[in-house]
Image (cartoon, rainbow, N blue to C red):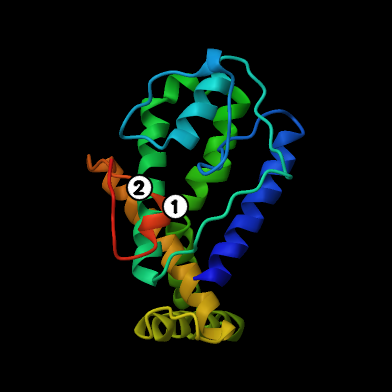
């Protein structure tokens, strides 16, 4: 899953740099971040600390900045199944945080959360609407082409899923698979959070990429 993980991290870093210019980074990197002791508090065990801390710190009026020179190293997910579970957990915790911390977010910070996180979690809905609408308008040859292109894209993603998202897959197969897998995973996480499921188990990074697991 290296290709997909690197692309995602690169995009997140770019958005963090933009948000840092206005002192309002929305989410920290859980593997490496720090905050003033006066802003530290007990954490909700059901929420991700790298989201809860910046939300509460931002609500307290503190500037939240991104440091591009900070470095941490973490192994990528070893399988598509593990990456799916990771993204589902992150989205589920994020959706739950949006509800529990709703009084901590307002104005621009709320807009950030809705535009950067919430809309991305719900990408499956407009994507399905596009697929259905192009099918319904198939009497126009251009929409037939658009519909056919989408079908080919999803067939490639399914073929990638059949191969387990293995790293030796060519980019042509891996990219559609990673995109579809990621959007389905986060959507499922949000749905599960709305149904009352919590994601309180956290796997230590060094051990969560192998066969051993340690939970807290």
Q: Alpha-carbon neighbours of circle 1 within 10 Å: few (<14), some, or many (≥20)?
A: some
Q: Are marks 2 and 1 in contact (CB under 8 Å)?
A: yes
Q: Mark 2 to mark 1: distance in Å?
A: 8 Å
Q: Earlier in the sequence, mark 2 or mark 1?
A: 1
Name the residue nearer the viewer: 78 or 58: 78
Look at 27% across and 48% down and name the residue there.
192
Q: Secondary structure at mark 1?
A: loop
Residue 60 spot, x, y in % from top left: 56, 14
Given this view, does label 2 or label 1 mark the residue nearer the observer? 2
Residue 167 spot, x, y in % from top left: 49, 80
Which quadrant is the C terminus positioned in? Answer: top left
State the residue lying farthest toward the left.
Answer: 196
The residue where tag 1 is placed is 122
Is residue 66 in sight in this rendering?
A: yes
State the residue lying farthest toward the right.
Answer: 21
Look at 44% across and 65% down and name the residue there.
77
Residue 34 spot, x, y in % from top left: 58, 30
The residue where tag 2 is placed is 190
Residue 71 spot, x, y in % from top left: 65, 48
Name the residue nearer the viewer: 136 or 184: 184
Q: Is residue 37 above or below residue 13?
A: above
Name the residue nearer the viewer: 142 or 208: 208
Judged left or right of residue 178, residue 99 is: left
């Amino acid at each position: 899953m290296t290709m997909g993980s690197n692309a995602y991290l690169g995009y997140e870093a770019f958005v963090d740099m933009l948000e840092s210019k206005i002192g309002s980074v929305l989410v920290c990197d859980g593997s490496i971040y720090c905050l003033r002791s006066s802003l530290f508090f007990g954490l909700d065990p059901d929420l991700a600390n790298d989201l809860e801390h910046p939300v509460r710190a931002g609500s307290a009026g503190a500037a939240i900045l991104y440091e591009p020179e900070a470095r941490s190293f973490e192994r990528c997910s070893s399988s598509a199944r593990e990456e799916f579970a990771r993204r589902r957990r992150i989205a589920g915790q994020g959706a739950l945080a949006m509800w529990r911390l709703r009084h901590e977010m307002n104005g621009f910070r709320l807009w950030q959360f809705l535009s950067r996180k919430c809309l991305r979690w719900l990408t499956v809905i407009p994507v399905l609407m596009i697929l259905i609408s192009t099918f319904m308008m198939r009497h126009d040859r251009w929409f037939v082409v658009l519909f056919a292109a989408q079908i080919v894209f999803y067939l490639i993603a399914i073929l990638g899923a059949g191969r387990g998202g293995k790293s030796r897959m060519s980019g042509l197969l891996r990219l559609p698979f990673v995109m579809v897998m990621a959007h389905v995973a986060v959507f499922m996480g949000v749905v599960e959070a709305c149904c009352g499921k919590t994601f309180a188990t956290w796997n230590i990074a060094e051990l969560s990429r192998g066969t051993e697991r340690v939970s807290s």
